[in-house]
Each structure stands twice: as structure tokens, then as C-alpha cells.
Image (cartoon, grey):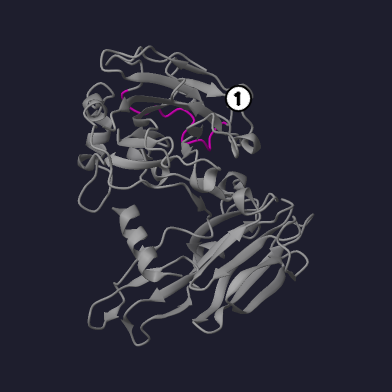
Amino acid sequence: MNWLRLLLLTLFLTLTVTGCGSGSDDDGSNNNASSGDGDGDGDGDGDGDSAESTCGAPDTDGVVTCTIDATSYTDYVYFDLDGQEIVDLSDSEALSSDAWNIALRRYALKTNGGASSNGHAAAALVDAQEDFYDDEGNPDTTTFINATAAGERDHLVNASTLPDSWVADAEVSALAPEAINDDSSCTPISPPQYRIDYGWYIYHGGCLPTPHTIEENDQNGWLLRSAEGDSYARFRATDVSYSTSDGVSATFAFLVQLANTSSFSETRTWQVSDLALGELCYDFDADIEVGDCSGTAWDVKLMADGQDFSLRTNSGPSGSGGAGAFGPLPWTEITTYDNGTTGPDSQPIASHYSEDTTSSVIDLESWYAYNLQNQHALWPNYRVYMIDVDTEDDSSAVYALQIIDYYDPDTGNESGHITFRFLPVSTN
């Protein structure tokens, strides 16, 4: 992969069924998170069968506040900022529609552009609310708990400076976690460079004794769900190498739980040699490599384009199957899982598997903190984002947006009811 580009990206990234407010300071949202049903992995009572929204009239500053019923675990709710209304679209219809600007599904938010659709929308973080975090980026619990929507409103109203650049939505997979720049075990050469952990392999960008090489990270692993959804595997990379002339070579080890069985028992090995361009897929049930990745008869994909290479599951934007991944976790922890359906404590783990999806900068520069004071809930950080609805049209609208609540404002309990407020920003 293009190491410099990815390093810069890594550094950059690190850096409503019920009523809503009238758009005034008293917007009806919870000041603090409710314990409710947690972060969306709780009672699952939100089916999202008929998502609704309520938006108040613009206040004297032009701020509009809306609450969206985004309780579905599977379907996005598509929203038109111009019309201040939900657009009735299926996920497949939304791919080619310009009638929406943002889409919400529980705590996730995407824009109409980049990897999410054929549109040209993009977003940017314009107020990071740095006082909500300490110098190491950890949430300041006291600040989160004491913050209120009314007290943080000025951050939105005063957002007027356009960002230097916009960030389009990108593909996200549990098999492609955010890269970690880790030089703690690195003996640097001159000039000092870096060691980057990409989850299943490590790039030595200047660490002795083998600078500018990659190797497997066999200390990490994942649980995988097959494309058919009825079999599972424990999985990790055991050997990875790369050359500019031949491409990437890798060996992946699987321990498989076949359909209609109750434990991991079948050993599989997938070896890929000299993949410089294109993609190869693997079916861990049948233990076969698949050259045609267009169907459902595969579970894991390795893609390569020169120095760019990555793994995906057969799901979401990456494939038409129902595969998913849980991890990465330390391999010593992964080995405590005897099967793919329950954890070491015998509790169900079906909700732990993530399908491939797309993600906006609002997800990457997250709008919330989770599990403060050991409460399984979300607290907003009141960050402010801007959304350009069409980056290819200089006359298109730009909005500043702030998410202020995650819970039903009537009950304070049911999660997935996103309350956000926004206003147009002058581009002159």
C-alpha cells in the first residue's frame, strides 16, 4: 500500500418516532445519556419498520432540530437536509439517488458520496470539542456528564469557517482496522520513521533490523461468520511478505466450525502467492480458493493493487453474502472461543459480528463516548461537522451539524433515536 498516504490518513483520523425540540435551547433532549438499552446491542426492540422524524421550525439563528427513528439494526434512514425530511428509499435505491444528503442507522452516519453512493457529498470535522478529552485522547468523564445540549449550542451557531478539505465516505471492515502507528518496539534508523500495525500485518517503515518491509501480525485474530451465515472460523495471518516485483504473499490459518456443528474442529490453510493486482477469495467451508468473487461462494477476500492490499468479508459493499467478522482481538483471547456463537462465558455473541460497511468522517471522528462510569450507554461530545451536499458544485449547500442525543426524548430509554441540529453555512 502507499505507506506515506496511509500514514497521513492515519494521523488525520487520529487527530427520530418521537417529538423533538423546537430549535430553541430547550430542545427536549437528554442532558446526559440514559442507561436505556445501551449502545444498540441491547434489547433490540427497534425494528425500524417505519422510521419517522419530527423536525422543529428554524429558530432565530436558523437552527433546525430533528429527531430520527434510526432504531433499525439493518436499514439506514435517509434524510434530506434541504427539505428537512426523511426520504423513503431502500438501501439499494439510495445508491443512485440524489434525493438524500445523510443517512443514519443507530449510531452510524454516512453521506451521499464516496463509497456510500454515487453522489458527491462529503463531510469534515470543524469543532473537535477537545476539552471533552484528555491529552491522550481519553474521554473526560466529568465533562461529558456535565455537558448539556443547551450549553454546547454556541459551538454549532458559531461554526462559520469552511474546512480546508472534505472527506468522502470510505469502506470499513473489521478485517481492515484503523492502522496504529506504534514505535514502542522500534529501533529507528535515521531519519526516524515508524512502525504501523494494520491488524493482520505490520509495516516496518524504518525500524531495524528490517526497515521498509512487512510481516504478519500473528498476535491478532478474528472470529468469522461465513457468507451463508451458518458456519464460523477462528482466523489469523501466519505469514505475510511483499515485494515490489511480485506483490503480496500471505498464509492464513483457520479453525472452522462447519454448519450444523457446535465447535471449531476443522483445520484450514489458505496460501496466496504473488498477488500484485486483482483479488482472490476463499471459502473456508469448502477449503477452496475462488477466483470469481462476484457470488456468495466465498467468505474472505484479499485485494491487491500494487502497494495497496487489504482483507474484506463477503458482505455489505464488499460482497453479496452475509459474512461478518468479530475482532481484531489478541490471539490468546480468540483461542478461548470454542465456537462462533457463544463466548467463553457462554453468552451469545451474534451481535458482535460486523458486516463490511461504509463510514463517514462523522463515524471516524466519533460524536460520542461509550460506557462512561461502566454504564453501557452513549454520551454526545457535541462535536460540530460540516457537510457539503455536492463537492463538485460550487453553488451547493453546506450545513453545520451537531448530534445531541441518542435516546427517545419522551422516555429517555430507547436507543437509536438520533436527535441532531443543523443550519446552513454561508459559502461566500
Image quarter hosting the C terminus: top left
Q: Which residues are magenta?
A: 31-43
Residue at image x 42%, y 69%? 2
* Rendered view: 24 above or below 196: above
Percent position of residue 136, x then y? 24, 53
* Rendered view: 32 above or below 257: above
Please say whether residue 34 is one of the residues in the magenta stretch.
yes
Question: Can residue 336 be seen in this snapshot?
Answer: no
- The number of numbered badges drawn on the structure is 1
Residue at image x 49%, y 47%? 114
Of the pair 247 and 163, the residue shown nearer to us = 163
Percent position of residue 392, x then y? 43, 42
Please say whether residue 52 is one of the residues in the magenta stretch.
no
Image quadrant assignment for residue 162: top left
Left or right, 189 with reference to 404: left
Question: Can residue 308 be seen in this snapshot?
Answer: yes
Q: What secondary structure prevails in the magenta region? A: loop
* Rendered view: 141 above or below 21: below
Left or right, 160 with reference to 401: left
Amino acid carrying mark 1 in the image: Asp
Residue at image x 49%, y 30%? 37
Q: Which residue is mark 1?
A: 88
Density class for disc 1 (Cα within 10 Å; few <14, some 14-19, many ≥20) is some
Of the pair 65 and 87, the residue shown nearer to us = 87
Percent position of residue 290, x then y? 73, 67
Image quadrant assignment for residue 379: top left
Residue at image x 72%, y 68%? 291
Percent position of residue 145, x then y? 27, 31
